[in-house]
Structures are given as C-alpha cells and as structure tokens.
Amino acid sequence: MAQVLRHMHLPGIVPYSTAARLQESLVARFLASKPPSNAPAPSPHIITAQFAPVYTCGRREIGTVSPEQQQHLRANGRAAFVEAMRGGQTTFHGPGQLVAYPIIDLRAHKLTPRDYVCLLEKSLIATCARYGIEAMTTEHTGVWTSPDDKIAAIGVHMRRNVTSHGVGLNVGTDLSWFDRIVACGLEGKRTTSFEAQGVVGKSVEEVAREYVREIAARLRGVETVEMVGEEEVAGYL
C-alpha cells in the first residue's frame, strides 16, 4: 500500500527539547501499534528544524562529560548541553543547521539498520548535489566534501525497528561553535557548510524541503510528501 511521508517542520529557531518531545510522542505512537496491539501503524514522519545553540553527546558518552567540560560547552549561557540517546559522539546544533529526524518503522520499508544509514547518506549527498556541492562518504560516519571536511553528521537511535534522531546538515551554521569540541572525536578534521562551500542565501526551510523529497524518493512504499500544519504539530507536543 502506498504511503505518504508526513513532513513536520518546526518554524523559526526552537529549543532542542521541543523537537525531542515531538520525536518521543511520535515514537510512542509507533511502538503502541506493535504486536500484540491491533492499532494501525502511523504513517512515516520526518521532523525538520533548526535549534537554538546546543551541544549533544551520544548515548555512549552519557555520564562521561565532566561538569567542567559541560560548563565550557555552555559558553557562558550562550548554548545548552544535552545527553541524547542517539549514536555518535558530541556534536553541535544551532541556527543555520538543518536537523532532520525521520520517525519510521524500518520493517515497513524493508530496510536493515545499515540500509537505513545508507539511505540517509545518499539523500544528504543528493541534496548537496542539488546546490552544486559535491559530497561523499568516507570511512568515517557522516557526509563530507573532502576527506577532511564534514558537512553533515549522522547519529540515529532505533527501538524495535522504529527510528529516531537523524542528521545535522550545515547550511549557514556559524562553524566557530565547533571549535569547542573535537568534531565527531576525529582530530585534524574540520566542519564545513553550504556557505563555506560558496552556496549562500539558502534557508534551512528550503533545504529541508529538498532533503525530505530525497528521503521520500528512496523510502520504499512512499509515493508523496505531505506537509503537516502547525496546529497538528502542536497537538503532539
């Protein structure tokens, strides 16, 4: 049966916690439809947003970031620090960066976890190509414009094959925020963005629409994308 990918875009700059609550609400609905329940499974969803400055660490680092490190990351109150359940290491999210969280059931789309990460990568690469940026994968996670310049981070979580968290694609991000961390734990690597690659004037909202289209084109069983209205999004929060 053909499905619709429901696109939930949070306008403006929002706290990380807003997207986290929306994500948790959607994941709960997917899990509630699992056997032995007879409830119908929700449609696949994807949340897109740009966050107020926040550093997040992955689940393997929970409890290991010292109070002194956290204080450094909070930058005298200019940023937040959050422990997240995603994979990957400490990274930055902030204005000018597209964050995209697909909430889907992998089994419904006949995807393995490895297939899913590959789908996210290919969709990022195709989105960059739409704007004339040649991107690639390397032996390290994420999407890169060179072996040393990373334009998008990937960190996902899966529970009973239901996905959460996702990607962060730098569009007009202030890259100086990354100076406070070793990006993705890789010494000698740099972060880049659309603007640093010479593509200026593109909004996160515009790039979000392109990325969601690329995801939909690769997600088996999905035929169209549907924008979800702000009132309906608010009902999930």
Image (cartoon, grey):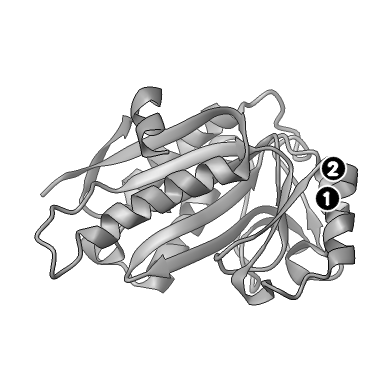
Q: For this view, does 231 lie left or right of residue 195?
A: left
Circle 1 sits in a helix, a strand or a loop, which is it?
helix
Kind of residue at badge 2 = Gly
Quadrant of the image containing the C terminus: top left
Please name the residue shown 61% across and 45% down the image: 16
Rendered position, 37 above or below 14 = below
Please name the residue shown 27% across and 56% down the image: 30
- Check residue 152 in the rendering and tell me which mark sits there, or answer none: none
Is residue 12 among the parts visible in the rendering? yes
Q: What residue is shown with label 2?
A: 77
In the depicted view, which residue is nearer to us: 28 or 9?
28
- Percent coordinates x, y for residue 62 in the rendering: 67, 72
Q: Are marks 2 and 1 in contact (CB under 8 Å)?
A: yes
Asked where in the image residue 173 lies, by quadrant, the reply is: top right
In the depicted view, which residue is nearer to us: 134 or 226?
226
Q: What residue is shown with label 1?
A: 74
Rendered position, 209 above or below 181 = above
Please name the residue shown 57% across and 62% down the image: 155
Q: For this view, does 89 lie left or right of residue 103?
A: right
Kind of residue at badge 1 = Arg
